[in-house]
Image (tube, grey):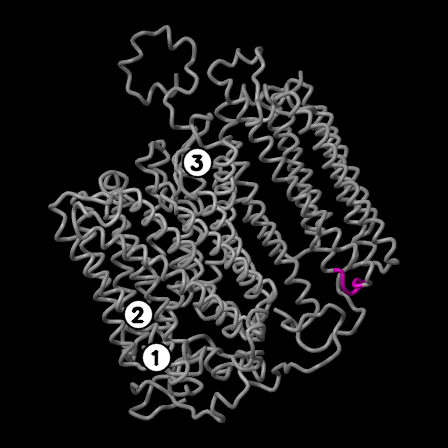
Amino acid sequence: MSDAAVTHEAHAHPPGFAHQFETIEQQRDAGRLGMWLFLMTEILFFGGMFTAYTVYRSLHLPAFEVGSREILEVRFGATNTAVLICSSLTMAMAIHSAHSGKKKGVTMMWLVLTMILGLTFLGIKLRFEWYEDYLHHFVPGLGFQYRPEWASLGSQMGQVQMFMCFYFFMTGLHALHMVVGLGILTVLLIMTARNKFSPDYVAPLEISGLYWHFVDIVWIFLFPLLYLIGGRY
Amino acid sequence: MSTATLDLPPAVPAESRVTYLNATTGIKSWLLTKDHKRIGLLYLATITLMFMIGGLAAFFMRLQLIEPQGALVEPETYNKLFSIHGIIMVFFFLVPSIPATLGNFLIPLMIGARDVAFPKLNLLSWYVFVTGCLLALIAIFSGGVDTGWTFYTPYSSTYSHSAVTWMAMGIFVAGFSSILTGLNFLVTIHKMRAPGMTWFRLPLFIWSMYATSVIFILGTPVIAITLFLLALERTLHVGIFDPALGGDPLLFQHMFWFYSHPAVYIMILPGMGVISELITAFSRKKIFGYSFVAFSSIAIAVISFIVWGHHMFVTGQSVYAGLIFSVLSFLVAIPSAVKVFNWTATLYKGSISYEAPMLYALGFIGLFTMGGLTGLFLASLAVDVHLNGTYFVIAHFHYIMVGGAVMAYLGGIHFWWPKITGRLYPDMWARIAAALIFLGFNLTFFPQFVLGYLGMPRRYAVYPPEFQVLNVLSSAGASILAVGYAIPLIYLFWSIRYGPIAPQNPWGAKGLEWEAAPTPPPTENFDVMPVVTEDAYNYQPLKGAHHSV
Amino acid sequence: MHEHGTQEHGHHSEAIVPVKTYVLTFIALLILTGATTGVAYINLGVFNTVVALAIAVMKMLLVILFFMHVKYQPGLTRIAILCAFFWLGIMMTLTLSDELTRKWELNPAPWSALIPHMSHLPHIMRLFF
């Protein structure tokens, strides 16, 4: 071993430094890579449902078109897509604000805006989509009723219920991830209030941002795949 | 001891030095530890318990199968026994075994780091794993599971009256634990190698752990969503797998096996990594074809993801898909064979010594080869039509999982035991146990190849009388195997208190964990952080009876 | 590999992404959302799906490259993301290779029913009629 060996001396480190690392840059790189690896698992996790969806849609397209066109409402899906895109912007701005050394109040404002947009998304979904679906007997397992005009699908009519199954499973799993995201944002809000972040140390904000943007991306695919099947012409 | 050992007298006996074992005391210091070495030991204790539970199920199965119309258990109970045996052994023993115990302990040491990248996440992964184990135990005690470890629908989603949902949750949670472990390992290996530790100087154990971690990340989420959907279907009675609801049972199988086939490579790749370490250490020779062995681990991990349909040849899968999967399944044998050739070439003209770890390693090479070759029969579509669902399949995978993975695990535990505990175990008893395990294993599982070929189906509580002799031989072998496993449990425990104090490097092995870290290591692993200047396995030939450094 | 030795405080080697980039990305995302919604009201046949997916991929790339900073990251991040999608592709492709080729006649073409002597053709030919 040579004299170039690094000893574990007690030299001053930036805030939030963890001592299994040599430098804060190494720690930051490691944190990012770790979050990306986790997001890879999420891609495969949602991907399993997307695969199942692709199989059934390929085999039963007419029934899926009926479900998408006649049960789901594009205005809510499109609005929610815009809401999430706004929330990605506000999240990015929150990190930007902390990284640029702005006052913690500014960062907190952006975080709160992100949370409000997230809650808006969930509110629209729960009140105007799921609750209405429930009232109109479109929820599989909770008194699902087939419309008489769907009888033209013949033996495939049952696949309309299958489509709604996918709708609730996929948007439900997505909503669950949003709720977790709101929890993470709450923690970040508290950490910001307690002055944990500085231009040198924004890692928790940054990697939580990655998670939040990922949840947005899942919705970016859910919207056309669920709401826009078969067109509206 | 053999002539191949190198004894450096310890400067200070282990008990008076501060090591990771005595740095802090009390149960809280263990349950709240962030030290990867202690976490490895926490895992070791947990999976040993789970192994005993899975083994108990096997014990009753083999007892039942002594008689053709055995009346030890009802057929419904037998269904639960083989299901629990498979589930516990796969998800709660083999998948975490080497990665969470030896991987956790060794990876930072081998690459010259102070700990893994995310020590708190590491501790969390153990708690998550324990939660999964508890959920599985709840499943066992609230009626067990009778679907087989494969949970095929619609039986598991609709018709089974057993604790499927509890068990599915347990596997989901344990799987999440493995994702956290794999994530930690990948980041650690990418970002925390010591200066001079380039990719191609890494021990091959690290390469195999890297490949295993890739499978953890890419495969485990799919079993997670599959079991999640199964649990939803079972509880809500709506879903995508039951034909009565418009679903496709084969879709479940595709999604299940997309993970579960790579999972078997999760179970064997770390073992292969251990064997590379053992073979080099006990032939005192550089590995033959380092890059081939390193890349073969990656190749196995990649190819493992495109062969899963060979579990579905007779389920009604499309013949075209069957053809594709059959061809691809032959492909995966190639990198495994590369490893076997390279290990053998490493042995050639090496200074071989036969301590217990080496006995396990040599046994691995033979038994893994047999298991692997019999896999080729099963990969052949036409032959599989006859062999699928028979004891041939069972023998095939037990040769790999038990003759391979478990023996590699035991070999690794023995090899690194001095590093972990600072003590030596009694080598004579270790060799006796290794021999008994080898003998017991072959007696248990070789007859099963014959049984399968002759047509005895798997998962049956009773069988035609003409199969009795072979079944009795198999059960006899199982009892020898059980004794073989019990012996190390006893002397390893004994050695913690009463074994001789180990020198820093009792085997004279190469590697940062042996040469740069004390035995046992301090909490921070190294007194002086190492800088690497040489390749792995840089063994120098021995001159005469005296040791040269 | 990492550097060793002390680092000066306040020195972060990373440039901050300007607000303008974020705003432009945001606007592009909203435009694409409007586009995909609008295109759904135009009959493009099977291309409705293609266009919808293409737009979704573009939106995803905008979020990944700019909001998630991947444009400014080392290659390892991109490899990781590509691997995840590639593996998802493996799962979809091979699963569909079974699901879509299982039945001999998915949607029998109407005129094949009019040809009574089709039954003497080998099974494989029926895939194409």
Q: Label 1 to label 3, Cα distance in Å?
A: 54 Å
Q: Is the magenta stretch mostly helix, strand or loop?
A: loop
Nearer the observer: mark 1 or 2; the answer is 2
As drawn, B507 above or below C57: below
Question: Mark 2 belongs to which amino acid?
Answer: Ala
Q: Earlier in the sequence, mark 3 or mark 2?
A: 3
- The numbered disc on residue B486 is 2
Question: Mark 3 belongs to which amino acid?
Answer: Ser
Quadrant location of the C terminus of chain B in the rendered image: bottom left
Q: Write down the residue under mark 3.
A: B157
As drawn, B467 above or below A135: below
Q: Which of C48 and A38 is in front in this view?
A: A38
Q: Mark 2 lies on which chain?
A: B
Q: Which of marks 1 and 2 is nearer the N terminus?
A: 1
Crowdedness of circle 1 by 10 Å Cα count: few (<14), some, many (20+)? many
Question: Mark 1 belongs to which amino acid?
Answer: Arg
Q: Write down the residue under mark 1.
A: B284
